[in-house]
Amino acid sequence: MKASDFLKTLEELEDNEQIETLIDRDKRRSPSPARNPKRLSSGDAQFVRAQDDSTRNFEFTYKAARFEEGWLLDSLGYFYEQHWISDVLRKIKAGKEASVYLCRAGEQVDAPLVAAKVYRPRMLRNLRKDHIYHEGRVVLDAEGHEVIDVHALQAVLNRTNFGEQVRHQSWIAYEYTTLQVLFDAGVKVPRPYENAQNAILMGYLGDETLAAPTLNNVSLDPGEARSLFDRLLTNIDLMLAQERVHGDLSAYNVLYWDGDIALIDFPQVVSPTGNRNAYAIFERDICCLCEYFIEQGLPLQPRRIAADLWRAHGYRLGPDIHPSLLDADDPKDRTAWNGG
Ligand SMILES: Nc1ncnc2c1ncn2[C@@H]1O[C@H](COP(=O)(O)OP(=O)(O)OP(=O)(O)O)[C@@H](O)[C@H]1O
Ligand SMILES: [Mg+2]
């Protein structure tokens, strides 16, 4: 796609505030900037260039907007080539960070349908306030291995354009590796099949016409509410045993299908021992989840539930500080080191 076409297409995607912001920003710089690719920032220009390299070797049923089509071909081309998918059928949902698409499975998959979570281009992503989650997390590459290249790590710290790419990749890798670990441990999550530079492929919950609703859209009778809540706690317990705190848990990130549940959306996952805020994050997860179940009629004490689960795994309730995270100049950290 030529840069000028790309920018025109951005204008077609009216529902996206960030795209509008991007175009506005460009308009402020030049009288007819949307026609002038020279005015793009280096990051934007790099993204536009990436559109020229897309793998355009498969056609799919889903009628994507022009720009979206290029992005899907880039993001899902590998899954198609490797026979993980044979078609893209429709968009299930556009989220803040990613859109999820229903795909027909390829020969590699033992199921008729799969879900592909395709992350938005970095410049169009509504970045979560993610700094709180990064503490205690190593940077991962696309294969889920720790990045040890000093230049890459420095770029991440300096937030250069390349560093932001590495960070974006790491964010996706956390989602995929977490799905793998949790699925193998028997936690109710969609089955992870494969990941690519910008997308993950997983089991789909729903049928051809209807994707599983998220729990916040479902009304339960008290009996079912109790049994689903207990099942969720069992899963959260299993997650803690795997040293994973979801970090954005609520009824919005639980799918409900065939009377059962599945947890989704893991890029921000944190370790119970590696992050100073882990307990606060965990408690917030439990409180958000309980909010829904209290509305469904269950009498719950979220803070107590959180504390009991946490303690059962031997994690400390106070900020659990790994020595490598201590700051010699911070009096609170000095007190903690001295056992205070
Ligand atoms: N495996 C799946 N099967 C069916 N539907 C799914 C699946 N995974 C995700 N979805 C749907 O896609 C939506 C977005 O997924 P997810 O929460 O992982 O992405 P997100 O970009 O973080 O979205 P949001 O900003 O809404 O939290 C979910 O709310 C759900 O409706
Ligand atoms: Mg979500």
Image: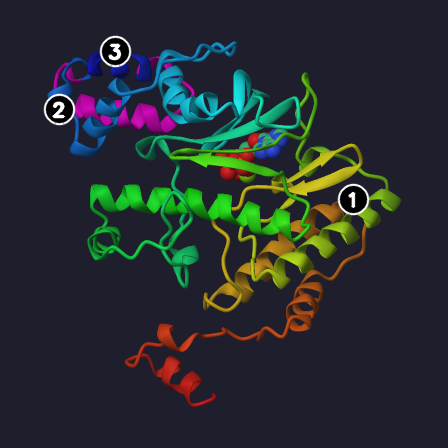
Task: Compute the Cα span from label 3 to label 1.
Answer: 49 Å
Residue at mark 1: 296
Quadrant showing the N terminus = top left
Residue 192 placement (x, y as % from top left): 57, 39
Q: Are marks 3 and 1 in contact (CB under 8 Å)?
A: no
| Comes first in the chain, label 3 or label 2 | 3
What stretch of residues is rendered in magenta?
Answer: 11-33
Q: Is residue 124 left or right of residue 38?
A: right
As drawn, the label of residue 123 is none
Task: Compute the Cα span from label 1 to label 2.
Answer: 53 Å
Residue at 40% in and 33% down = 198
**Closer to the camera in the image, 156 or 37:** 156
Mark 2 surroundings: few (<14), some (14-19) or many (≥20) residues within 10 A: some
Residue at mark 3: 5
Label 2 residue SS = helix
As drawn, the label of residue 39 is 2
